[in-house]
Amino acid sequence: MQKYKKVIDHLQELMRDPRNIRNIGIIAHVDHGKTTLSDNLLSAAGMISDKMAGEMRALDYHEIEQQRGITIKAANISLYYQRDGKEFAINLVDTPGHIDFTGHVTRSLRVIDGAIVVVDSVEEVMVQTETVTRQALEERVRPLLFINKIDRLIKELKLTPQEIQQKILRIIRDFNGLIEAYGEPEFREKWKVKWDNDSVAFGSALHGWGLTNSIAAKKGIRFSDIVDIYNEDPEGLALRRDIPVHEALLNMVALHVPDPIEAQSYRVEKLWRDKQDEELFNALKNCDPNGPLIMGVNAVRIDPHAGIVVTGRIFSGTLREGEDVYLINAKKKQKIQQTSIYMGPYRMRMDEIPAGNIAAVLGLTSASSGETVVADAIKDRVISGFEAIRYVTEPVVTVSVEAKNPQDLPKLIDTLRKLTLQDPNLVMIHNQETGEILLKGTGELHLEISLYEVRKAGLEFDVSEPTVVYRESVRGTSDVVLAKSPNKLNRIWVTASPLNDEVVALIREGRVNERMDSRTLAKVLREEGKMDTEDARNVWTIDEENYNLFINRTVGVQRLDEVREILRQGFMWVMKEGPLAGEPVMGVAIRLVNAMIHEDPAHRGPAQLTPAVRKAIFGAMLSANPVLLEPIYEIQVSTPPELIGSVISLISQKRGKVVGIEERGRISIVKGFIPVRETLGGFSNEMRSMTSGRAFWQTKFSHWEPLPKSLMEQVALEIRRRKGMKEELPKAEEYMDTL
């Protein structure tokens, strides 16, 4: 670490002025070459030797990443760069490309202002390229394009210089198509990439060379020269010497990525919710190091020596050791014990870190990803802080985990809890009654890697076969259903009906939530959600996790206000476990139509009313044409053209549907949808055997769809059996009472 001392001392000086800082990330589809590219940037900064760059994968410091050759976590590093006499401190974040780890990408985007999107010139723009670019644009992060693996076009595909140029132009056109589709109107034209203005570079990260328009003009290099060099030397060593890739990339970053002051002037408007306090809002917009401390947390890691390490970006103020801060979401006051900047796996201490930088902090033990950390003095002025981080993927695959030795159970639960702290896309459910531990993740690989971490802690456990997470919903509207409390002294009448897609979208995107005042909420639901005026005015509870509403349509019911909280809790309980198979309920409106509440508080407590609410909602849902929703993946398969038939027939056999086929030179891309249930287990082996291992595919969560009638009963009974419930489908009559 001593050898970095000079670099770090100089970086610290530069970091004091936000105008010298550039916060960038490298994002891409899996295996398109991000980490290899990062290595070249590290070698330029003198962090690893030139010889090892491209092979060392310095930012893949997780041993499983080095073995599998994919990046799982997001790694941070700070670099020094000089251009035209101006010096820059560049904070770099390398992110995973595999769809199961998209959560790490989403969290990294919060703290960066520019992203280098790496596209493999052979595969071109893929499903995950689209996902990460869309996420970047949503967070108002400026995308730049690096087209990688040009060496493969020359050596493997043996394309002519004209064919290669056509391929590059097609990638630029497709990439700009994504910016056109997902960019906000004010940034669309400004952010489209062009060869002429150096917002596009191409090259080979493995061989360490890269080219932009101005470098090509300055050094007098034509495309045919590159082809000639490869014909003489397959490793292209002369290219690494003459046109090193770090020059092309860092040049592009210095030219096009805004400094934190400029970036926050337009990003904060979208990321910060509390716009009513002008002083805070302006400090954030101006990235003011003398303003009140406000930091957005993007990652939480457990360090075996230091404990919980929180990484985040300082949007305003200066982070100092020993200061008291307040965590908005956790509602806790904590003390900052240590502040440092990242150098790959190492943390370098800095006593104070000003706004605009990405820092690592010790002492914030209650923080989680998406937390807003503010100076304790201003805690009362911040209501909700930063916008919640929205994830593209949902946890749709579950495994059950069982400790081999009962004495290991507390340690196992503690280790899993720490894992879910680090990765909010993991959900752990521990059933206190049955002792069952369930772990939900975005895909099989995601769960496999997460459990690998637990095994490393020396715990022995058994893992069940992965199962799919379903949701319950209704297709029709029920009649009014009456249910009585166990003591028969309270009565509740409810109806159930499906919510329209617009309202579900509003809840999913966080545009309606529990914290809004009732007038604003009613206005948004009525105007944007096309909801009935009376319903919109009387929303009692929003289930933000599963997108359901509890609406009070009663008139003049006595003592209702006194039991309102109990009824709401009953509603939330039912939404977690529906009547068909105990799966979460989604997209349902429950209306409380009438109620008779006993005057004696002893007879109307939670023990009486909660079961009554549950019974009434179960009865209403079961009489409203209940349905199980299954998660659907979007699938993209790249395959040689002659194997298209095999790929389509396999997707069709698996209840999937193909929506398009695209020719890209010597490979074809088959796009379609396939139920998650059908991809578990042997799907990858079947795909390999049908295509002799020549097809590559990737899936990402797309949407929920009703299960076909023929399968619904079978699946519901399977789930009930697994959960130890009664092995028959419930009937509405079992839950209905008569007057």
Image (cartoon, grey):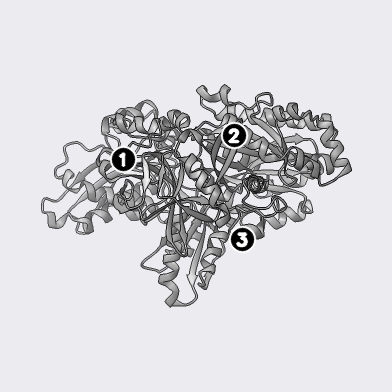
How far is mark 2 from mark 3, CA to CA? 30 Å
Q: Secondary structure at mark 3?
A: helix
In the rendered image, the quadrant that contains the N terminus is bottom right
The circle drawn on residue 460 is: none
How far is mark 1 from mark 2, CA to CA? 41 Å
Residue at 84% x, 33% y: name it: 225
Q: Secondary structure at mark 1?
A: loop
Q: Is residue 17 left or right of residue 36?
A: left
For the residue marked with disc 3, what is the amino acid? Ile
Q: Mark 3 packing: few (<14 Cα in 10 Å), some, or many (20+)?
A: some
Tell me where residue 16 sits by quadrant. top left
Tell me where residue 729 sits by quadrant. bottom left
Q: Position of residue 712 (x, y in %)?
A: 52, 52
- Is residue 583 in sight in this rendering? no
How far is mark 3 from mark 1, CA to CA? 41 Å
Q: Position of residue 322 (x, y in %)?
A: 32, 53
Q: How many numbered markers are drawn?
A: 3
Q: Nearer the viewer, mark 1 or mark 2?
A: 2
Q: Position of residue 105 (x, y in %)?
A: 54, 45
For the residue marked with disc 1, what is the amino acid? Glu
Q: Which residue is mark 3?
A: 64
Q: Which residue is mark 2?
A: 253
For the residue marked with disc 2, what is the amino acid? Val
Q: Which of marks 1 and 3 precedes in the sequence? A: 3
Q: Nearer the viewer, mark 3 or mark 1?
A: 3
Q: Secondary structure at mark 2?
A: helix
Q: Which residue is mark 1?
A: 514
Tell me where residue 290 sits by quadrant. top left
Q: Position of residue 351 (x, y in %)?
A: 40, 50
